[in-house]
Amino acid sequence: MSDIAAIQFSAYGGPDVLSMNRIAAPVARAGEVVVEVHAASVNPIDWKVRAGLLRNIIPVAFPMTTGRDGAGIISAAGDGVSPDRIGQRVCFLASRGVGTFAERIALPAALAVPIPDALTTPEAAALPLGGLSAWAALVSAAPVTAGMKVLIHAGAGGVGSMAIQLARHRGAYVAATCSAANVDFVKSLGADLPIAYDRDDFSKAIADVDVVFDTLGGDVHRKSYGVLRKGGTMVCLVAAPFEDEGAAHGVTVKVAQVLPDPDALTRLVELVAAGIVKPIVGKTLAFGDFAEAHRLSERGHGRGKIVVTRR
Ligand SMILES: NC(=O)c1ccc[n+]([C@@H]2O[C@H](COP(=O)([O-])OP(=O)(O)OC[C@H]3O[C@@H](n4cnc5c(N)ncnc54)[C@H](OP(=O)(O)O)[C@@H]3O)[C@@H](O)[C@H]2O)c1
């Protein structure tokens, strides 16, 4: 087959700029594999890029294929890659510019991380970007250790749901903000103190926090300085610029760098296989429902991840 289906956009705009196009089938160059994508997840970065909100930070070459992560089966191996890898189930975070909403993608073999039978393909597709974002923040940038008090904003979302589980696994006391509707869900993930942002003011509900994970920016960022202990850390994930008030509050502000880190993804897969953390698939849609998948993500009130599946 010389061409494949891919979900692309050729101009910035709403979900309607997305369309399913035929593009040249990828080939595995030296060191690469081709993966038949069976499921891919939607991340807020997908619609932010599509809408042009990040055009000054993330340049786009049109037509652009949407999507950053997913899961599937290796269908070809390039020079230098063991042919034994063909047929392996894998999940991946692709590099920027490689859209994963496609029938097949090519990527460096190292980025295709094997997944065990215990993990369904939609769960595996839900893991990479959400899990690696939580990892970049709470393991790499602001390492959480036993006994720490951690506040995770947007605990019900794709990143927050993984962050709660990771922080708990590392022995922290975990507070997390979410809507009142998601309090029980966030508790079920292991949060000790769910704080409903539409009912309570988080800045009055908790104090002396060691690490705040800011996934929201804006007012939430500004108010979060007040709940940190002196010497604490605010670790941020938002792409939008913010004013670093760390010095005035005696805290450190860090920005988590989310990269396609196969070692970290392997560790996450191991934690999932051991039953310690679980990627949350809040909604599954058919591959053809790509515009609806973007629309749902854009509403910003998902539980865990939205995943589109091809089979
Ligand atoms: N820079 C990076 O590399 C990077 C990587 C990953 C993610 N991000 C960013 O991180 C953010 C979160 O990503 P995600 O994948 O977790 O998004 P998501 O799955 O769409 O989740 C959004 C969550 O935000 C919650 N929320 C909305 N307003 C809130 C508030 N005022 N207080 C607390 N929670 C609130 C919602 O909870 P309710 O439904 O309960 O309202 C929802 O669960 C996005 O802005 C994304 O772009 C950045």
Image: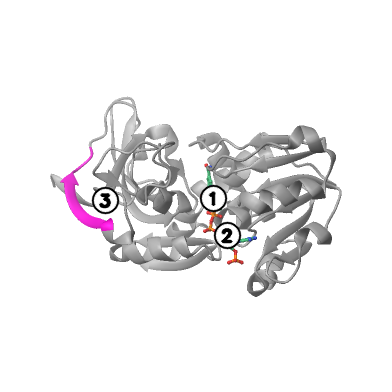
Q: Can you say whether 225 is above or below 300 in the image? A: above
Count of numbered labels shown in the rendering: 3
Amino acid type, residue under disc 1 in the picture: Gly
> Which residue appears farthest toward the bottom when viewing the image?
181
Query: Where residue 38 appears, x then y in whole percent?
Result: 34, 56
Q: Residue at x 83, y 60 (%)?
A: 204
Q: Which residue is mark 3?
A: 8
Q: Which residue is mark 1?
A: 130
Please report whichever mark, 3 or 2, sits nearer to the chain's N-terminal start.
Answer: 3
Q: Which residue is mark 2?
A: 157
Amino acid type, residue under disc 3 in the picture: Gln
Q: Residue at x 18, y 46 (%)?
A: 23
Q: Nearer the viewer, residue 172 or 119?
A: 172
Q: Nearer the viewer, mark 3 or mark 1?
A: 3
Q: Residue 284 is drawn in which quadrant?
A: bottom left
Q: Nearer the viewer, mark 2 or mark 1?
A: 2
Q: Can you say whether 71 is above or below 55 in the image? A: below
